[in-house]
Image (cartoon, rainbow, N blue to C red):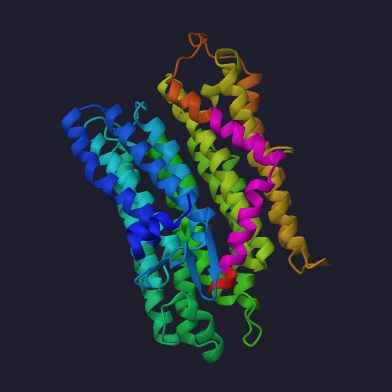
């Protein structure tokens, strides 16, 4: 069996076939809930949709080949009207989003935080948001990216506020909408300025037009406003204000979905637009752009880690940790080499499992009646040894402790900033800041571990904990991935390297 079976049946729709499956699933989800009135039915159907879409995507990704400037699957060009192009980069990122959606949907049906009254709409919104992310990474122009990002944003606003029993969700939703609206305005203004300056919105024409026309004030304004607009999406400092409140107020499966999925979509936009536009350009000076990204990366990782130290709420702590992780990945934008991009992509995958696993544990413990304060985790090792061990595993991985996945991905990412073609890079200082911040992060991660293993539980909370089994399954899968990717990274690192070369070679 190869991908030609899809091209023979679906023709040029093959390029968006994984998305079509998800759209159909989103359309039927409210009907499934209306007919069954059971969250389990919606969860099961949603998971089937995600798995079917993922299997199709994996087959397409396996059989993809490059011929000239076009991507072929079984002899047919995998493009959809020139608007969307299926490449190995798009396929790899689509796989990441499908993994995130799988974990989020798997536990949503059993989470006591997720709405029961509108669960059909919840499932539809989750699939729509995932589909938007998939369209973003396959889009071939700035407008396609913009529309996909807005589909994700609007769905995310609703997902956050569907936690109706908690007033924090309403507050978080309002803040999210306001900040999101500002982000949208900055982004579309930036796109208009870029188009006015370069005369194109096609990703494969941006670098050519930039080299031909050089810097103009209109282009400078457009680039800065686009960076600010999409900077909100990845919660990079100083555009991070919304993230802690939204992650705290939303249901934990939604927080996990935003931290590991929506953030990666924003980073993919940075790679597709700015990295492709500026990498390898020698005719026009691009060092100021590199230093701009380096400053954003350094500030993000420093602000995220330093402010996380003062947090007493576990979800807010993880939110600031996510801001720091975004800073690490933005190193690839400053260095602008295929190897650095490979490290960035690999760290995006490991972050899904270690940060996603940590949020899943928080969600499971909330179902078991444990609060969100770090002090509520006192004595957790006695009440639930497996949960405590898994949380320690994820936190050590986030800090970059070997031999876990976080160490391996940080090693690849940071080494991209240290060496460039065997010579010492000019970005060693940025790698030093990243390493120093990783050491800082260990302090507040160990604080949670200390609470779990050393502190005694409060009186009246000494009993064993009970939580839904699906949470245990999801957490176990994430824990296995964190260990395996740390010890045997090549089976994912090689596809990341292929995707990096593909992105920088096709456009």
- Residue at the far right in the pictured view: 423
Vertical position of residue 164 compared to residue 339: above or below: above
x 44%, y 29%: residue? 363
Can you see residue 284? yes
Q: Is residue 496 magenta?
A: yes
Asked which quadrant contains residue 166, the reply is top left
Q: Is residue 476 left or right of residue 253?
A: right
Q: Give the x, y percent position of residue 372.
A: 47, 29
Q: Give the x, y percent position of residue 144.
A: 36, 68
Vertical position of residue 29 compared to residue 288: above or below: above
x 56%, y 67%: residue? 503
Can you see residue 441? no
Q: Is residue 2 left or right of residue 281?
A: left
Q: Is residue 204 magenta?
A: no
Residue range corresponding to the magenta coloring:
476-503
Asked which quadrant contains residue 190, the reply is bottom left
Q: Give the x, y percent position of residue 29.
A: 24, 40
Q: Is residue 445 left or right of residue 48?
A: right
Asked which quadrant contains residue 330, the reply is bottom right
Vertical position of residue 225 compared to residue 48: above or below: below
x 61%, y 32%: residue? 480
- Taken as a whole, is the magenta stretch helix, strand or loop? helix
Q: How many marks?
A: 0
């Amino acid at each position: 069996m190869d991908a030609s079976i899809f091209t023979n049946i679906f023709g040029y729709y093959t390029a968006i076939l994984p998305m079509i499956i998800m759209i159909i699933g989103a359309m039927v989800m409210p009907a499934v809930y209306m007919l069954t009135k059971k969250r389990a039915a919606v969860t099961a159907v949603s998971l089937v949709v995600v798995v079917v879409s993922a299997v199709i995507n994996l087959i397409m990704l396996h059989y993809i080949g490059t011929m000239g400037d076009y991507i072929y699957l079984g002899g047919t060009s995998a493009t959809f009207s020139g608007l969307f192009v299926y490449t190995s980069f798009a396929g790899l990122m689509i796989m990441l989003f499908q993994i995130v959606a799988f974990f989020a949907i798997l536990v949503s049906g059993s989470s006591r935080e997720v709405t029961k009254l509108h669960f059909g709409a919840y499932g539809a919104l989750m699939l729509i948001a995932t589909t938007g992310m998939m369209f973003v990474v396959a889009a071939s122009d700035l407008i396609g990216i913009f529309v996909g990002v807005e589909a994700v944003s609007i769905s995310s606003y609703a997902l956050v506020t569907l936690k109706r029993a908690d007033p924090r969700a309403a507050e978080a939703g309002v803040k999210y909408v306001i900040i999101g609206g500002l982000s949208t305005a900055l982004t579309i203004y930036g796109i208009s300025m870029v188009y006015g300056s370069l005369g194109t919105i096609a990703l494969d024409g941006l670098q050519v037009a930039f080299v031909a026309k050089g810097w103009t004030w209109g282009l400078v304004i457009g680039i800065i406003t686009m960076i600010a607009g999409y900077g909100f999406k990845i919660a990079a400092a100083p555009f991070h204000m919304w993230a802690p409140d939204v992650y705290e107020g939303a249901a934990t499966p939604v927080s996990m979905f935003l931290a590991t999925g929506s953030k990666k979509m924003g980073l993919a936009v940075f790679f597709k637009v700015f990295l492709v536009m500026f990498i390898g350009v020698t005719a026009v000076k691009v060092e100021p752009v590199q230093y701009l990204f380096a400053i954003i990366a350094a500030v993000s990782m420093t602000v995220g880690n330093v402010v996380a130290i003062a947090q007493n709420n576990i979800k807010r702590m993880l939110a600031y940790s996510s801001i720091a992780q975004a800073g690490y990945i933005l190193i690839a934008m400053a260095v602008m080499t295929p190897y650095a991009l490979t490290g960035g992509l690999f760290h995006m995958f490991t972050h899904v499992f270690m940060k996603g696993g940590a949020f899943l544990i928080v969600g499971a413990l909330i179902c078991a009646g444990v609060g969100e304060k770090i002090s509520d985790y006192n004595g957790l090792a006695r009440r639930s040894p497996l949960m405590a061990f898994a949380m320690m595993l994820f936190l050590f991985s986030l800090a970059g402790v070997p031999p876990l996945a976080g160490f391996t991905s940080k090693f690849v990412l940071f080494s991209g900033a240290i060496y460039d073609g065997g010579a010492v890079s000019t970005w060693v200082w940025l790698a030093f800041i990243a390493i120093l911040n990783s050491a800082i992060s260990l302090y507040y991660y160990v604080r949670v571990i200390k609470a779990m293993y050393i502190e005694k539980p409060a009186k009246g909370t000494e009993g064993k904990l009970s939580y839904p089994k699906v949470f245990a399954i999801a957490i176990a899968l994430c824990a296995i991935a964190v260990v395996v990717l740390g010890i045997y990274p090549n089976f994912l690192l090689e596809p990341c390297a292929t995707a990096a070369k593909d992105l920088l070679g096709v456009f």
